[in-house]
Image (cartoon, rainbow, N blue to C red):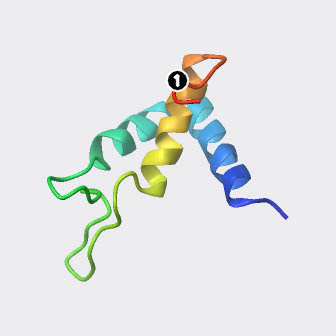
């Protein structure tokens, strides 16, 4: 069974290789608002999680993978 981190990494790899417009869109839309909550996750029926949300984390990981960097800048 895969861990959540392994699943995130797998999705990020797919986005990096096949869907660069998608991870760019997610990075742009899932930014924090003035209260630190994710703008992209907010709906009229429920509040938004604190930023960074899981979608932003996966998109950021896809960006890192696509860049070809060997060391993550925040490690």
How busy is the neighbourhood of tag 1: few (under 14 within 10 Å), some, or many (20 plus)? few
Q: Residue at x 54, y 18 (%)?
A: 67
Q: List the single residue furthest toward the front.
A: 75
- Give x and y (percent) for residue 23: 45, 39
Q: Residue at x 43, y 47 (%)?
A: 56
Q: In the figure, residue 68 lies in which quadrant?
A: top right
Q: List the single residue furthest toward the right.
A: 1
Residue 35 to residue 30: above or below: below
Residue carrying label 1:
73
Q: How many numbered marks are there?
A: 1
Q: Is residue 24 left or right of residue 42?
A: right
Q: In the figure, residue 69 lies in which quadrant?
A: top right
Q: Is residue 51 left or right of residue 43?
A: right
Q: Residue at x 73, y 51 (%)?
A: 6
The quadrant of the image that shows the C terminus is top right
Residue 52 to residue 2: above or below: above
- Give x and y (percent) for residue 25: 35, 40
- Give x and y (percent) for residue 57: 49, 46
Q: Residue at x 25, y 50 (%)?
A: 32
Q: List the single residue furthest toward the left.
A: 34
Out of 73 and 54, give the one closest to the viewer: 73
Per the image, label 1 sits on a secondary structure element best described as loop
The quadrant of the image that shows the N terminus is bottom right
Q: List the single residue furthest toward the bottom.
A: 45
- Give x and y (percent) for residue 34: 14, 53
Residue 55 to residue 16: above or below: below
Out of 51 and 29, give the one closest to the viewer: 51
């Amino acid at each position: 069974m895969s861990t959540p981190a392994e699943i995130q990494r797998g999705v990020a790899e797919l986005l990096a290789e096949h869907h660069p417009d998608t991870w760019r869109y997610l990075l742009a839309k899932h930014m924090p608002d003035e209260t630190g909550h994710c703008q992209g996750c907010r709906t009229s029926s429920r509040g938004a999680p604190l930023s960074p949300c899981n979608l932003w984390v996966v998109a950021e990981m896809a960006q890192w993978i696509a860049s070809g960097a060997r060391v993550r800048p925040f490690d």
